[in-house]
Amino acid sequence: MRTPRLSELRGLAPAAIIVLAAALLAVGFGVSGTHERSLVSQASSWRGLVGGARPSVEVGQRMLVVLKAPSLAQQVAAHGGFATQKQEHNWTRAAIAAQKLLLTQLSIHGIQVPVEFSFARVLNGFSAPLDARAVALLERRPEVAGVYPVRVAYPASLSSKLLGREGIALGAGSLPSVALSGYDGRGVTIALLDTGIDSAHPYLRGRILPGINVVDPDVRSGAPAVVDPADPSKVEEHGTEMAGLLVGAGGSGGFSGIATGASVLPIRVAGWQRDLKGSWSIYGRTDQLIAGLERAVDPNLDGDAHDAARIALIGVAASYAAFADSPEARAILGALDLDTLVVAPAGNDGPAGPGYGSIASPGGAPAALTVGAVDLRTKAEEIPVAVRNGLRLLLDRRLPLAGAITSQHPVSLELASPRGQGSDPADFFDGRGLSLVADRAALLRAGSDPRGAIENAVQAGARAVVVYGTDLPAGGLGLDESVDVPVVSVPAQVGELAAAALSRGGHPVASIGVPDTARNGTSTQIAPFSSRGLAFDGRVKPDLAAPGVVLATSEAGRNEDGTPRFATVNGSSGAAAVVAGAAALLAELRTDLGASDLKSLLAGTASPLSDTSVTAQGGGLVDVGSAAATELTAEPDTLAFGNARGDGWHAIQRLTLHNVSSRLFRVRIRSVGQGGLEIVPKPNQVRLKPGGSTTVALLARIRGAPPSAGSAEGSLELLPRASQPLRVPWAITFGTPARAALSEIALSASSFKPSDTTPAVLSLRAGSLLQTPAGPQVQPVARLDFELWRGKLRIGLLARLRDLLPGQLALGLTGRGPGGNRLSPGRYRIELVALPTAGGRETRVAVPFRIK
């Protein structure tokens, strides 16, 4: 839908505050996603390797409005999870009626809201383009729970052609710990919220149900993998790849998906859409994602969720937006209440600072089963590399071969550098159009998109590529098949010395030998690109981890000879697909389990990885065999104690235990961890009848003087007698929590006359982004209020913005009050009130001005 201009909202009264759409980058009125791209560009280069450069996307003034009236899911949860078809029909109609009543009342005030998506099942609300006054009016309405930004979400993995012996990438298809003998997921439906799918691919063998197209709802042919409208050679691939990981079978070399007997319901929530440059790019929006969840729980839209998919896999992610109260997080809780387990990727933004992590949305949702990526390959290709500058030997060692194709003969090449980072193909050519790297080894500093720079270098004629400033994993780059030269990464110091020699007119040389197979040095470790927690509510995320590097699967389209295409994928969405397939196996075996129990079993029985933080792995590596044999579940499956500060600090969380067996047993509870924190369960033993539940209190407290900074982590161990244990991971940070940051506050005119056309501009930066040795430290803002005051009198709320990632805001003050009335001459002030995401003290800043 085209976003209307402000002037096209007929009957709209003059606004007290105008959001300047071109400048508001952080909250969704303008160009959403810029804050996320800036984070990506400042983080480790792996963020460009998995997913590549993300296009700039404009969401216009789209916002998500959440109502207080209950959704279908909330009604079902309030009735113990049981409801008749008639009840569900009535509750769905009641939710829709509440929306219509609100929209009618808004129209009476002269505000016509062009609703784009309406939600009634997993969430009661709608998305629509809204100007600042409409947002402020909705925030003041008693029926409204909140107004939130629409964000942009991108596919959370990257593909490459299958390479290596017999057409299989080295290590591809190796998926231990995700098989149940005799079970293949038969009878289980997995909703796949992703791009379209090539359902005719023989690897998918008719396991794909007729699909639903949210991106193009007028298309009646299901959810096909759509061709780029501007380039017929490009097609949506990600959905087909995820479907292959779920249900594929009969691949070259014998590889297959996880749940070969399950059925996939494709729901196209991402695909070719216009980007900021007017070109076509593949992405989705969070309102499209929620619309997809609506269809996952009610495929035929009849208002009855008894036909809901058992599992929903989300293949896209919005970087860093790990808000626990976001509309998409609420929608995932709604899906869980309707007995659909939602599996989401952690994201591909790598390590982050000591507080909040780099978890993407909707992976930050407490109700999501969020998955990080592990590299399980035992072997990888290595290659001898030597770098010399004259007689000085800068490097001589074996390095991982990041590029999967190379000559079988040693080469010795002069190094050459592009004019810039190499992200633009023109960087590799001089003013006369001659290549700077032809027949040489291109020396590249890792930037925000090293994968693109590598491909540009090869297209410019480079015979090898040497990258410095990042660690490239063996074979995990996802390079295009046109890259047929060796690609290696060298230590930063080596690269800097070689670059310095080039700048002085020197001629450093790289000698690259023949690759061979060696032990994979990163085996059974979290992949360097995988995002990690805490989420913004202080909760451990991801919940668990799964294989996510060089996974063999199907790819949309056909080769030139008509044969089906295959690929390998790297990324946390591939890991999430592995877990979704494992959930299907478990659901087939244990049909009596609800979605919450499936979630707990998979997370709580995962196998911890040694020397790995719980904030990177959650419970550990998925182990569906252990999950199948476990008789106890817990809710929640990870804990959020927040920030520990001051003498005598303590916090209480509650944990509900559920006996999912047919026998009576006793459960002992103990805490295992380090870092000066103890967790005391009350009681520390419970007795559970078959099918019974009980709730225990968990008291977290500091032993002795609290550390001034740092963190502690561990797990709560639940030990049923004569049964498999269950683990619930926790992590906590120490020190005074940062207050919500407001900075760079400026008002263009401290004295002005009321004007609807030339408002005074209030600019500021909300939130903060710090660079730490562990990675970027994100400090978001949960809520930012703009209050109008005159002396000691609070006149009212001009605007309220929620869930802000760090970014610039620019707002126009028209000299009108909250009701649109012109302010009389005199002195006023705007009180900026910012709340942090995990509680704590508010930040309040006054901006005085005078109305002439």
Image (tube, grey):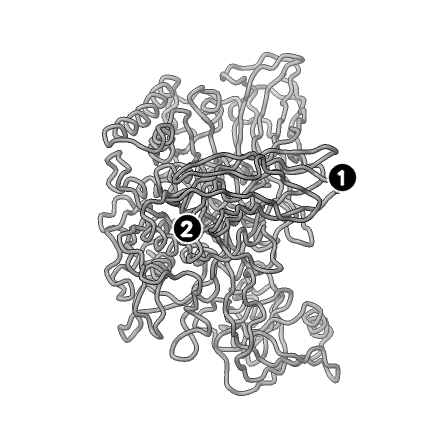
Nearer mark to the viewer, of 1 and 2: 1
The residues tagged by marks 1 and 2 sit, at their Cα atoms, a distance apart of: 50 Å
What is the x, y in percent for residue 452?
A: 51, 64
Where disc 2 sits, the SS reads strand
Q: Which amino acid type is marked by label 2?
A: Tyr
* Residue at 41%, 54% in the rendered image: 629
Compared across the picture, whether 358 is left or right of 134 comes to: right
Q: Residue 833 carries which label?
A: none
What is the x, y in percent for residue 525?
A: 56, 62
Q: Residue 704 carries which label?
A: 1
Q: Earlier in the sequence, mark 1 or mark 2?
A: 2
* Residue at 27%, 38% in the rendered image: 306
Q: In this view, does 689 lie above or below 17?
A: below
From the image, tell me which residue sits under label 2.
283
Compared across the picture, whether 570 is left or right of 39 comes to: left
Q: Which amino acid type is marked by label 1?
A: Gly
Q: What quarter of the picture does the N terminus occupy?
A: top left
Label 1 environment density (alpha carbons within 10 Å; few <14, some 14–19, many ≥20): few
Where disc 1 sits, the SS reads loop
Compared across the picture, whether 470 is left or right of 376 comes to: right
